[in-house]
Amino acid sequence: MDRRSFIQGAAAAAATMWATSRTDIVRAQPLAGDGPFGPLGPPNSDGIQLPAGFSSRLIAVSATPVAGTAHIWHGFPDGGACAPLAGGGWAYVSNGEVGDGLGEVGVIAFDAAGNVVDAYPILRGTTRNCSGGMTPWGSCLSGEEHIAGQVFECDPTMRSQGVPRPLLGTFGHEMIGVDPATGFVYLVEDHPEGRLYRFEPDHVGDLTEGTLLAAQTSPDGAVTWKRVSHLFPDRAQDTTPFNGGEGVWIMHGSMFFTTKGDVRVWRLELANQRLSIWYDAATVAGTCLTAVDNIVGHPHSSDLFVAEDGGNLEVAMLPTQGHPVVAPFLRFVGHDASEVSGLAFNPDGTRLYVSSQRGVDGLTGMVFEVSGRFHRTQRIWERLDRPSLRQPVAQAATVTNVSLKQAPLPNASPVAGVSALTPRPSRW
């Protein structure tokens, strides 16, 4: 065996060992039980089980006009996000995972009272738009989930046609997060040997120039980054495989992301680039969270809400502050051929948007709004807070003041009744 073959073989073995064991970076795992809102009640008229004090309303159905508008809602609604609008309203952004160039990203605009005021497309003609995320400078990123998938940047406040951002990589995209302290873009790949990627723009807020990297992770959780090509998925032996990347959420200096193949939630500390396993289903007896997909953090309590693609179609609560319980928050009943998707909180955290991607008939997607006493979570769990997760993000304001490049985007037109974008607070 020559020296190069030996080194490559050793690197591959190390990556495999790290991918399968990683026991030294597993934090103390939560217990299964009821969360701060109590147990789930019986199914309501929407076929949703929720704790007492919460209610749901149906706001969109695939192939049907959104109520009060002429916009036909897209099929297979997947990843979601919310953007604040001037006047206290907000826009709910939804990706449509439809193939063969029929993909779409649609928006439902709400006023400050939560009334639907408009619905419109911000991206069309793409393929399998699975998910994405908001940027600190106010744009929306949408990623295609196929081997040649691209990321598109859109203006959520306008009817427009988003523009491709090819330097963010060519692979099966899922959720995307942007670190507000640096402007770095973090991306996961939906593949059994997918990589964790980071795009470092040359200028914060401009995704047309920069460098794509993939994570190299050591057994103790230290993460370094290797430059890779944006033209194809990275499979280098010296970068680390992750088993089916799905959700990404950045808050309080940490990035949380999910991998469906091993049913894990990971935490990457962004300042010191150290990785740990925040949740591992295999180690939690009787857990409700047996599949992982989209993930979102509550803007006040910082609790994570994790959607299941499979399992018993739940949204589970997973604390970041210290309360050691993973608990069901929502369960779909009668949606057996569907998956849970589209998680997003409105800016003040009083409403959670969630989709049943294929609904009760296995074909027709449904988007719901859940409202209730979310704000109580912080008070209940405050005594258990971890100070390390409640530190303000350093220099975040320097990113939130960046203007959207190429704004308005090509073919953009103002939406009646929707005011100009309000910069998102620095907790993004």
Image (cartoon, helix red, strand yellow):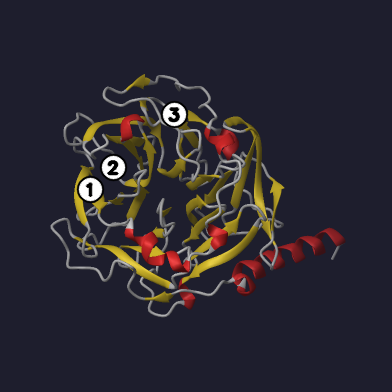
- Closer to the camera, 108 or 304? 304
Give the labeled residue for mark 3. 162
Residue that appears at 55% across and 67% down: 277
Mark 1 and mark 3 residues within 8 Å of each other at the beta carbon? no
Q: Of the residues shown, which amino acid type is indicated by label 3?
A: Gly
Mark 1 and mark 2 residues within 8 Å of each other at the beta carbon? yes
The first of marks 3 and 2 along the sequence is 2
Give the labeled residue for mark 2. 75
Q: Of the residues shown, which amino acid type is indicated by label 2?
A: Gly
| Residue 70: image location, x then y, percent | 19, 29
Residue 422 visible at all: yes
Give the labeled residue for mark 1. 364
Q: Residues within 10 Å of mark 2 (few under 14, many from 20)?
A: many
Quadrant location of the N terminus in the rendered image: bottom right
The residue sitting at the bottom extreme is 285
Query: Label 3's element?
Result: loop
